[in-house]
Amino acid sequence: MPEGALLEYVPILMLILVGLGIGGVALIAPHLLAPRRPSRRKHLPYESGMIPIGPAQRRFPVKFYLIALLFILFDIEIIFFYPWALQVRSLKTIALVEMALFVLVLLIGYVYAWRKGAFEWER
């Protein structure tokens, strides 16, 4: 390595140190400066101004997570249509065939989830 090669990394090192310093100050300053007046009411979970009823950590049915996961999965896959739509004319027929295969894979996944009952909401 040339002798001055490590000097090129000094700005990156300074950026990391400044970032860690700001993060450390942001984490430590509230503990040093904030007033401490603990009370029972302050330790209750906040429920949008309502008095909390029941335990704070309720169990949610797995359907909530399954629907959220499927939404994110299909939503992210749809994002791939945008760059394709911008370049479809310059890519010609091969792009159309590739996107048709992509849509077919998405459709197979959608039908599979549908048949497994992932979209049925139980009351």
Image (tube, rainbow, N blue to C red):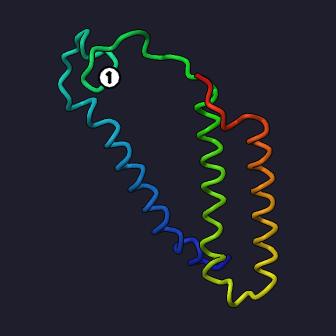
Where does label 1 land, which residue?
47
Q: Residues within 10 Å of mark 1 (few under 14, many from 20)?
A: few
Q: Position of residue 33 (x, y in %)?
A: 20, 32
Please name the residue shown 74% across and 41% down the image. 114
The front one of 98 and 10 is 98
Q: Position of residue 19 (x, y in %)?
A: 41, 54
Secondary element at tag 1: loop
* Quarter-of-image position of residue 89: bottom right
* Quarter-of-image position of residue 96: bottom right
Figure quadrant of the N terminus: bottom right
Please name the residue shown 65% across and 35% down the image. 66
Q: Is residue 8 left or right of residue 32?
A: right
Please name the residue shown 56% across and 78% down the image. 4
Figure quadrant of the C terminus: top right
Look at the picture and state if 14 lies above or below 1. above
Q: Position of residue 82 (x, y in %)?
A: 60, 72
Look at the picture and state if 33 lies above or below 5. above
Look at the picture and state if 102 lies above or below 95. above
Look at the picture and state if 6 lies above or below 93. above
The front one of 117 and 9 is 117
